[in-house]
Image (spheres, grey):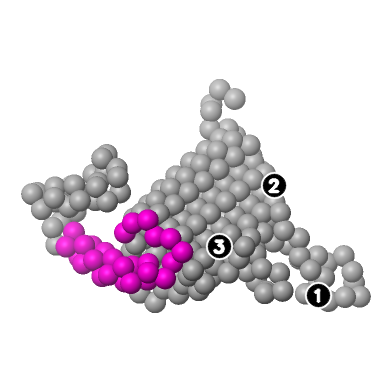
C-alpha cells in the first residue's frame, strides 16, 4: 500500500491532477510491470524530444515509433505515444499535442498526402486520447478539443477528391479541403469515420461504426451511416 501511494502521488504530480487514483485491485507486481514499461518509454522520449520543435515536459515513447518532420511537432507535458505509432508532421502548421495527450498503438497521423500541396496539420487539446489503430488524415486541418476520448480504429479524412470531369483521371483533378473540428468533451466510438467539413459540437457522443458526414450540434448523440442525431444528452430537450 505504501508503494502504491507513492506511485499515486508521483502520477498526480506528473499529470498535475490531484484527483488521480490507482485502482485498488492493481497488484504490486502488475504496477511494477507498468512502471518498467513507462520508464523505458520515458528514456526513449527523453532522446526523441530533443528533435521536436517544442517539448514542455515528460514524453513517453513506445517501441518502433516513427516521427517524420519532427521539427514540426510540438507537445505539452506527460504526452504518451505508444508502440508502432507513425506521425508525419509535414504541413503548414505541423502537429501540436496538448498536455496529457495519448496516441495509442498502431495509430497514424498523416498531415500531407502529396508534396505538390502540403497539408494544414493537426492540433489536439489537453487530456484527449486517440484510440489504437486510428488514422488521422490532416491534409485539410484537424482541430480536436480537450477531454476528447476515442475508441479504436477511428478515422478522420480532412480532404476530398474532385471527380466532376469524366475525361480526366480523378487523381489529377485535385482536392477540396475544409477541415474537421471536434469540440471539447466528446466521445467518438470505435470504428467511426469523420469526413471533411464536419464540425462536432461540444459534448457529443458518436456511436461505434458511424460515418459522420454533416456537422452536429452540441450534446448530440449520433449514430448510423450516415450518422444522424438520435437524441440530445439533455433529457429535457
Toward the right, the furthest residue is 167
Q: Is residue 32 magenta?
A: yes
Residue at the location (70% across, 51% down)? Answer: 197
For label 3, the residue is 94
As for residue 221 lying within the magenta part, the answer is no
Q: Which residue is mark 1?
A: 172
Choose top left, top right, bottom left or bottom right for residue 142. Answer: bottom right
Sequence-first disc among 3 and 1: 3
Q: Nearer the viewer, mark 1 or mark 2?
A: 1
Q: Whole-Å distance between the Cαs marked 3 and 1? A: 26 Å
The span shown in magenta is 30-58
Left or right: 21, with 225 as reference point:
left
Q: Residue 93's spot in the image, x, y percent?
A: 58, 59
Image position, residue 125 (x, y; %): 48, 49
According to the image, label 2 marks what residue?
A: 214
How many residues crowd around disc 3 within 10 Å: few (fewer than 14), some, or many (20 or more)?
many
Vertical arrangement, residue 157 with respect to residue 216, above or below: below
Amino acid at each position: 500500500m505504501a508503494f502504491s501511494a507513492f506511485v499515486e502521488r508521483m502520477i498526480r504530480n506528473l499529470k498535475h491532477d490531484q484527483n488521480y487514483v490507482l485502482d485498488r485491485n492493481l497488484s504490486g507486481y502488475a504496477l511494477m510491470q507498468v512502471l518498467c514499461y513507462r520508464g523505458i518509454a520515458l528514456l526513449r522520449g527523453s532522446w526523441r524530444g530533443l528533435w521536436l520543435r517544442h517539448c514542455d515536459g515528460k514524453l513517453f515513447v513506445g517501441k518502433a515509433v516513427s516521427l517524420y518532420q519532427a521539427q514540426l511537432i510540438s507537445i505539452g507535458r506527460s504526452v504518451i505515444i505508444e508502440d508502432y505509432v507513425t506521425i508525419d508532421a509535414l504541413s503548414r502548421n505541423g502537429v501540436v499535442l496538448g498536455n496529457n495527450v495519448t496516441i495509442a498503438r498502431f495509430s497514424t497521423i498523416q498531415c500531407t498526402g502529396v508534396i505538390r500541396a502540403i497539408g494544414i496539420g493537426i492540433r489536439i487539446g489537453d487530456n484527449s486520447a486517440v484510440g489504437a489503430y486510428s488514422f488521422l488524415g490532416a491534409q485539410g486541418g484537424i482541430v480536436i478539443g480537450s477531454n476528447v476520448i476515442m475508441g479504436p480504429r477511428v478515422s478522420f479524412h480532412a480532404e476530398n477528391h474532385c471527380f466532376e470531369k469524366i475525361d480526366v483521371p480523378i487523381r489529377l483533378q485535385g482536392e477540396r479541403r475544409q477541415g474537421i473540428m471536434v469540440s471539447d468533451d466528446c466521445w467518438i466510438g470505435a470504428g467511426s469515420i469523420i469526413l471533411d467539413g464536419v464540425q462536432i459540437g461540444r459534448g457529443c457522443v458518436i456511436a461505434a461504426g458511424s460515418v459522420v458526414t454533416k456537422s452536429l450540434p452540441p450534446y448530440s448523440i449520433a449514430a448510423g451511416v450516415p450518422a444522424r442525431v438520435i437524441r440530445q444528452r439533455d433529457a429535457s430537450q
